[in-house]
Image (spheres, rainbow, N blue to C red):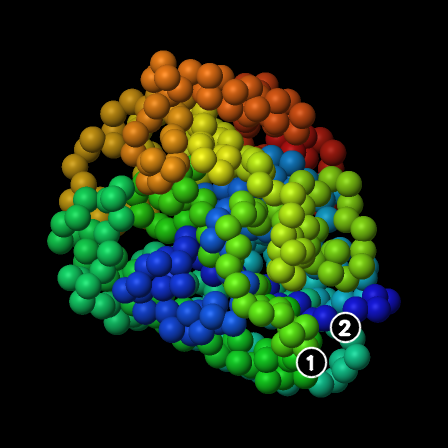
Amino acid sequence: MTTSLTNIALIHCHDLGDWLSCYGWNAVPSPNLQELADTSIVFDKAFATSPLCTPARSSLFTGRLPHANGLMGLAHDGWRYGPGVTTLPELLARAGYRTALLGLQHEDMDARVLGYDEVHGLGFLPRALEVARLTERWVETRRAHAGTPYFTAIGLWEVHRPWPNEDYDPVDAQSVTVPPYLPDNEHSRRDISGFYGAIRQMDEAVGRIVRALRSGPGGADTLIIFTTDHGVAFPGAKSTLYDAGVKVAMIVSPPPSWGLSPGRRSELVSHLDVAPTLLELVGVDPPEDLEGVSILNHIKGSPSGTGDRVLFLEKTYHDRYDPIRAVRTASAKYIRNFVPGPRLPLSLDLERSETRQGMGDAHLAPRPEEELYLLEDDPWELDNRAEDPECEALRKDLAARLVDHLEHSDDPVLRGDVPPPGPPCNPRTACSPQAAAAAGR
């Protein structure tokens, strides 16, 4: 049994990126998350490992990159964790924590194999306000487990597309902010106005969830983390390795009993860091295969040792095979596209979006094999400098770092086309070694 009595709540939503008022999107209606941020540690440069739901969540809940944990595509397309992969609830259970899943998960078609003591959400579509009510009820059950610390993952469907007006009240389309990678026209604005409406409802639910956790048993000793899986569901963001596709909100609210001051942190951090951070918090040595680093010192106000950090990003499968890998430093990003394709492939939800109706077809032009962006001058990654002679040394350096990483981590993309998963099975519980091998895990 761990000696720590710090409860842990990890709230995660869909497709948000960092589109919140506390991240400079001033017109976004997110007062509850603004209030949370004002009393928390806000990480300004937090990143997912992948721009897709299942692979991104796989890193959040294992501390390993998607190609290392097996989830290189979507769970409902047959991708499963590989043999021997240990999830965050399993790791924390070993430390004496009681673990619970409330609402959404997207790591497996069967949430019961993920290692939670309690599972209150078997589907992929639990709506935010529904999960808020579920959390309020679940908090009351905690009184029966007084003295036992808990870890709960609280998953919300929002703000995944679609955003129908009958479910979400859109804002005034003229009030929204259109990022530079999208055309600023009536189509984009109407689309974003619906997105803002969905954010407002998600924000309301998160406010209720946080209030329930803080007012419930052990509320003053509860660490609350809010994040999302990956970037926003717009062309040029979701399903790409540009920052718009992988940059995420990460707000950490320390237990009030710690007496910490709120603040912002500018260092690069990753979803990979969540597992080692929580394991350090509870006094457990992390497994050697975890690929992130603890950022507990950042939360407590004494950051050190991350000024030259490099993050690795990846995409393999979405609704098609699209292997892309990237390396990101504090000031530059190098992207390698492993197969030919359009400059900007759109997943089905984006192809059907209203934004797509107003963007023309320039994104269908062939993409280059290599991309290089100087982020200080070009934060939206609109100017590919891979063929610029002045950037040749930087391109070679980042390309070499990426290859070293792919070799060291045994990324299958270096061996040729990565096969799709085989027949649905769960190699962690019942798959034969032959079936697991056929599934490419």
Cα distance in 3D space between marks 2 and 1: 9 Å
Q: Residue at x 49, y 38 (%)?
A: 330
Position of 109 compared to 236: left or right? right
Residue 309 badge? none
Answer few, some or many: residues within 10 Å of disc 2's Cα (few below 14, many 20 plus, some between 14 and 19): some
Answer few, some or many: residues within 10 Å of disc 1's Cα (few below 14, many 20 plus, some between 14 and 19): many
Measured from the top left, where is residue 305 in percent x and y? Answer: 65, 43
406, above or below 282, in the image? above
Measured from the top left, where is residue 384 in percent x and y? Answer: 33, 26
Q: Amino acid at mark 2?
A: Leu
Of the pair 247 and 79, the residue shown nearer to us:
247
Position of 297 compared to 374: left or right? right
Numbered circles on residues, count? 2
Identify the residue position indicated by label 1 in the image. Answer: 218
12, above or below 246, in the image? below
Circle 1 SS class: loop
Quadrant where the N terminus sits is bottom right
Residue 70 in view of the camera: no
Q: Amino acid at mark 1?
A: Gly
Q: Residue at x 33, y 40 (%)?
A: 380
Identify the residue position indicated by label 2 in the image. Answer: 5
Pointer 2 with pointer 1, Cβ within 8 A: yes
Quadrant where the C terminus sits is top right
Of callouts 2 and 1, the N-terminal one: 2
Of the pair 373 and 209, the residue shown nearer to us:
373
Quadrant housing residue 193: bottom left
Quadrant housing residue 337: top left
Circle 2 SS class: loop
Position of 76 compared to 350: left or right? right
Measured from the top left, where is residue 166 in percent x and y? Answer: 26, 71
Measured from the top left, where is residue 312 in percent x and y? Answer: 55, 35
Q: Residue at x 39, y 31 (%)?
A: 374
